[in-house]
Amino acid sequence: MKKFLLLLFLLGHLPANADKWQGQSGSRRFYVETDYTVAGTFLTIPELWINRAACNLLRSENDSLFMTFTPEELSMQAAVLPDSCLSAHFIVYGENRDLTLFPVDSLQPHQWAENPVPPYPYTEEEISISVSDSVVLAGTLTLPPGRRRVPAVIILSGTGQQNRDAEFSGHRPFARIADYLSRRGIAVLRLDDRGTGKSTGIYADATTDDFARDALRAVETLKKHKAIRSSKIGLMGHSEGGAAATMAAAASTDVAFLITLAGVCTDGLTSLRLQNDAIIDTYPGYSDVWRRVNKEFLHRLFAWVYEIPLSQPLEPALREKYETWISAQNDSTLQMLGLKGREDMYLLRYLRTADTRWYRELMHYDPTDFLPKIKVPVLALNGDMDIMVPSKAHLAVADSLLRKSGNRHYHIVELPGLNHLFQHCKTCLQNEIPELPEVFAEEALEAIYDFFVKEVF
């Protein structure tokens, strides 16, 4: 009876419609629905693929509510705060999370302080770009207020299907870039990738060369816009988008400047090796021998793919090389590589990515075919903690090729402490990226704007 009265007391301090609460810890959203019965109480954590986990216990203890959920190993203990929020402690698969839950009407988007929110001091315009009969790209053009004939930049995304904001776990880095620049007199066009958002087409059928052609169609579209200065339209590409932007800039005099954000500047084979070496080096608890053996194997695997002519089917030739090598290895090596007993499974999984036109052509990307042709201003911007596009090797190639070609308007900038998504990182591992509250570092935005002041305006 005492517990029942206490529960009524707790609920009496909540507004009548406060039967849904939500909080956020890192990238994880915790959403609780309850009618204060076991049968009517559920927990949703979308980022862990937990959708309305059923409650199997609900009770009050002293000044707290306590709930457990099935079939997952989940529990919540919460105390009511004076403002009708809940101070909650969750245990999720043995991991502890403390956060505040706020009354909501329904599951809400992520809340990151750096994401731009309206009202904006600039205008937004929906843009449609016809690439072909089957591909129409859709995007958002932000235009500075009260200005005519402003410079413009088109943002190209990196590897993987992304919307116009390059959104991940609620972070919207391209929207933040557009907001920052358009507040300072620069128009920005950001686009949904093929087959994403409002864009049509099939993303998996496209290559880096196709993305470069898409960029040039976007330039053609902006040249006709009455608010854009047609001689000041440039490209900004992130990661693989940096390679696509470089290819486009080398192919057209309509591109007035080039910005690469953690852009691929080495050849494709080297880029793949550098990336995998850096990732292997981040694995904790492994010996130097393990790291060496795994790096050597991947270098060999990538080389096999590279050596097979693009005109030749990949799988038969790669399988022959792979199986011949496997048959010559001892059990210790195969176990160290995680291949023992799963040799064929490994190859089939790798072929899902490798046996595509996109992968094979990107592996043959050669910056010497493009960077020396670019005479317009260039900014190559990288974070020094990036393990996907390790900065020093890529920036060194960009610096060498641009210098040798006689380009006197290029800037190489390496920012300390930033990862591949230009966030200040702690471990700087890939699994940390969605958890970081930063959307896109202020100093990276400042470096981009400084480039506009020096070379574009």
Image: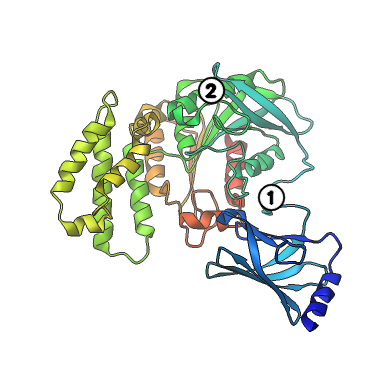
Quadrant where the C terminus is found in the figure? top right
Residue visible at 44% across and 34% down?
243
Reply above or below: 188 against 428: above
> Which three-letter amino acid code belongs to the residue tagged 2?
Leu
Q: Residues within 10 Å of mark 1 (few under 14, many from 20)?
A: few
**Quadrant the N terminus occupies:** bottom right
Q: Disc 1 designates what residue?
A: 109
Judge left or right: residue 160 versus residue 356: right
The part of the image, by quadrant, that contains residue 250 is top left
| Residue type, mark 1 in image | Pro
Q: Is residue 409 left or right of residue 358?
A: right
Distance of label 2 from label 1 (alpha carbons) = 34 Å
The residue at the point 25 percent across, 58 percent down is 336
Circle nearer the N terminus (2, 1)? 1
Residue 410 spot, x, y in % from top left: 48, 36
The answer to whether residue 255 is visible is: no
Q: Which mark is residue 153?
A: none
**Residue corresponding to mark 2:** 216
Which one is in front, 35 or 214?
35
SS for callout 1: loop
Taking 444 as reference, is 72 above or below it?
A: below
In the image, taking residue 61 as reference, residue 417 lies left or right, namely: left
**Residue nearest the observer in this picture, 245 or 254:** 245
Q: Give the camera-side residue of 126 and 182.
A: 126
Is 392 placed left or right of 171 in the picture?
left
Residue at figure coordinates x 39%, y 43% from the top left: 394
